[in-house]
Image (cartoon, coloured by chain):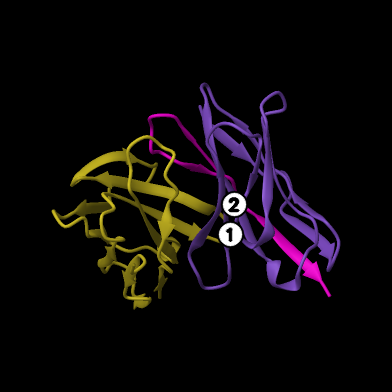
Amino acid sequence: AQSVAQPEDQVNVAEGNPLTVKCTYSVSGNPYLFWYVQYPNRGLQFLLKYITGDNLVKGSYGFEAEFNKSQTSFHLKKPSALVSDSALYFCAVTLRGDDKIIFGKGTRLHILP
Amino acid sequence: KAGVTQTPRYLIKTRGQQVTLSCSPISGHRSVSWYQQTPGQGLQFLFEYFSETQRNKGNFPGRFSGRQFSNSRSEMNVSTLELGDSALYLCASSLGGGGYQPQHFGDGTRLSIL
């Protein structure tokens, strides 16, 4: 069965420091991988996705993520955190040809001023 | 282009009642999915509709049902409400077809059961 793991419930980072939000996945085929962000009282917003090609993908608000097939990981990164990056982040996976999406449980990111 | 619209934004019901939530997807999107979000259980998949057919279903009791109309608008119904049904219900739409299209979420309906 497909699954997505976000091992950290919460990540605290000082403003200006680099941030990483971790995600690992387990699928039986070739995955499509996504990151979404949720601000309070809002729905999820799409940040970026990996479909194929370059393992480093860039997305909205300066975020990027690196697909690592051997480690089955897709960690979200940003070189310099902003207080406004504080939110709930979800990693998600689909299989090629299947629209069913599996979400991780989410990681709450706190950027400290 | 207008985003995904969910109505109402807030709803208060009592145990035993039933409720219908509405979702209007982005124009041209044929896939609509529903999720329940709670602090304890996180984001849980309810079901997905594509061209009026339910394609995928999560592990929820039969009290939770949905449908999709020919214009892709979707409704979700919960009957015999329980206290544990209090949650944020999110709708998401996508173009569908292949798994590589991102989902676009509405801001949800917050349902409170008294």
| Quarter assignment of residue B3 | bottom left
Residue B78 in view: no
Judge whether residue A98 is colored magenta: yes
How far apart marks 1 and 2 lie (CA) works out to 6 Å
| Residue A37 image label | 1
- In the rendered image, the quadrant that contains the C terminus of chain A is bottom right
Mark 2, residue position: A90
**Figure colour of chain A:** purple
Specify the segment rendered in magenta: A92-113
Residue at position x 64%, y 62% in the image: A61
Residue at position x 85%, y 66% in the image: A16
Which circle's residue, 1 or 2, is located before the other in the chain? Answer: 1
| Residue B106 image label | none
Task: State which chain disc 1 sits on.
Answer: A
Are marks 1 and 2 in one subunit? yes
Q: Nearer the viewer, residue B57 or B41?
A: B57
Q: Is residue A59 above or below residue B110?
A: above
Q: Which of A89 and B46 is in front in this view?
A: A89
Dot 2 amino acid type: Phe
SS for callout 2: strand
Residue extending furthest left? B70
Residue at position x 32%, y 38% in the image: B97
